[in-house]
Amino acid sequence: MVLQRNSNAALWGKADAKTEVSIITSWDDRKYIKESDKNGNWKIELATPNAGGPYSISIKNQGVTIKLKDVLIGEVWVCAGQSNMAMAMKGLKNQPILGANREVAVSTNENIRLFNIGNDISDAPLSDFKGQWKECVPQHVVQFSAVAYYYGKLLNEALDIPVGLITTCRGGTKIEPWISGNTINEFEFIAKNEKEGWYGRKPSSLYNAMVHPMVGYSISGVIWYQGESNMQKPNQYEQLLPGLIRDWRAEWGIGDFGFYYVQIAPFNYGEPGNSAFIRDAMRKVSLQKIPNIGMVSLMDIGEQNNIHIADKKTVGERLAFLALNKTYGLSGIEYSGPVLREMVAEGKLLKLYFDHAENGLTSYGKPLTQFEIAGKNKRYFRAKAIITREGVLLQADRVEEPVSVRYAFEDFVVGELFNTQGLPASSFWIENQ
C-alpha cells in the first residue's frame, strides 16, 4: 500500500467493543494506543514522514497482531469518473489503447501501487468496499485504468517518490450519483424521478458505495474524467461539477486538495445536442475562482466514431502536467492550452489575446478554419484567421462590427490552435464582450 507522506494518515477498523488497539510504525518505532468504541470501531492517525519505504505497520488487539508489510510513503491520488477513466490498459472489445502492449511489458515498478474499487451502488453510505492494493507489474497494470496508470507513472518519474493510485469509476454514469447526499439536495433542478433512478444513476448511490468508505484516507488529490453522460444538460453540469469538488473536499476535511479534470473529447454524439456546449461548461468551471483546480483539453485527440479515445497516454500525462505545476510547484511545465484572455474589436477586425501562450501560438503550419465571428445581430460567419505575435487576428467580410466569437464549436472537430508546448486550446463561445 501507499500512505500519504507528511500527513496524519488514518487507519481504521473493527475490534471487540471497548478494547485496546495499538499500532507500531516501523519508520519511527512510534506506538499509538486507542480504545475501540462501544460498537468496536477504532481509528488512529499515523504521523507519516517524507517519501520512503518499504515499511511495516503492526496492529495489535487482544493478543492478536496483524502486520502490514511493504508499506510505502508517498503521494496518493484518487482517480474517478466514468468509462474513459475506467478503461483499462487492455482496452475494451474492439477498442484499443495506443501502445499499451509495450507499455505493459515494461510496467514493473516497485514505487507505484494500484487499488481498484469494485463496482457497487447503495442508497446509504457504506463503511467498506471490495478491492485490494496490488503491485505495479504487467498482470495488474493490464487490468488497471490507462489514464490513471499514465498519470501515476509520470508523477513517479518526475518526483522520484512512491505513488499510490486508487481508482473509483463506473461506465455510463452521470455526475449526480458521485455527489454525497449532504450536497446533492442543494440542486433543486434534480427531479424526483431522477432521485428514484436505476443502474447506478440514482443521486449519491455511487458516492455512498464507492467513495464514502475511503473518506478519511489521506490523499494528495483527485483526477476526474467524466461528463459524457451529462452531455445534454451543460448548464446543470456547470453547477454540478463545482458542487462535486466542494462536496468531496468537505467530506475529506483536509483542505482544498488538487482537483484536476478532463474536458470530454469531441465525438459524434449525433442528435440531439452538440457536445461543444458541455465542453464550454467545463471550460467555464475552470475559470471560476475555485482554488487548486485545472482542466485538460483533448481537442486534438477525439475520435469521430469512438467515444473511448485510444490515446490515453496523452490524457494521463496532461493531467500530470497540471499536478506537477500546481500541486508540486515544479516550474517550467506548461499545464494548459491557450486560454482566451481578451478580445478587442477594431473596425472589421477582431483581435484575440491568450493566456498560457507566453511563447506564442501555432497551428503547426495548417490554416485556421474553425473561428466564427458575429456582429450584434448574432449571425455567425466563418472568419479568416491568422496567428500574429500577439494572438489571433480575425475578419469576416460579412461582419462589419464583430462583437462575438466562437472557436471549434462543433460536436466533432479536430482542434487547430495550440501553444508552443503542444497543448490545445479548448473550444469556446464568447458573446458580447
Image: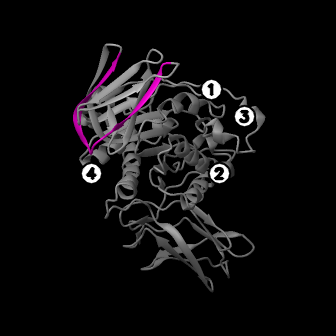
Mark closer to the chain start, 2 or 3? 3
- Quote the CA–CA distance across marks 2 and 1: 24 Å
Which stretch did the figure color magenta?
40-61
The residue that disc 3 covers is: 194
Q: Which one is in front, 362 or 381?
A: 362
**Amino acid type assigned to the residue bearing label 2 in the image:** Gln
Marks 2 and 3 sit apart, C-alpha to C-alpha, by: 17 Å
**Residue at image location 32% in from the left, 63% down from the top:** 331
Quarter of the image holding residue 143?
Answer: top left
Please report contact status of discs 2 and 3: CB closer than 8 Å, yes or no. Answer: no
Mark 4 lies on residue: 158
| Residue furthest out toward the right | 192
| Vertical arrangement, residue 113 with respect to residue 75, above or below | above
Check if residue 44 falls in the magenta segment.
yes
Q: Which residue is mark 2?
A: 239
Q: Is residue 17 above or below residue 74?
A: above
Instruction: Provide the residue designation for mark 1.
Output: 124
**Secondary structure mostly seen in the magenta stretch:** strand
Residue type highlighted by circle 1: Ala
Say which amino acid is labelled 3.
Answer: Glu
Say what amino acid the circle numbered 4 marks: Ala
Q: Tell me if 398 is positioned left or right of 209 in this view.
A: right
* Left or right: 83 in relation to 378: left
| In-image side of 53 versus 186 (left or right) | left
Q: CA distance from mark 3 to mark 4?
A: 43 Å
Mark 2 vs 1, N-terminal side: 1
Q: Residues within 10 Å of mark 1 (few under 14, many from 20)?
A: some
Mark 4–mark 2 Cα distance, whole angstroms, equals: 34 Å
Residue 68 falls left or right of residue 121:
left
Compare residues 172 and 33 and report the one nearer the observer.
33
Q: Nearer the viewer, mark 1 or mark 4?
A: 1
Q: Earlier in the sequence, mark 1 or mark 3?
A: 1
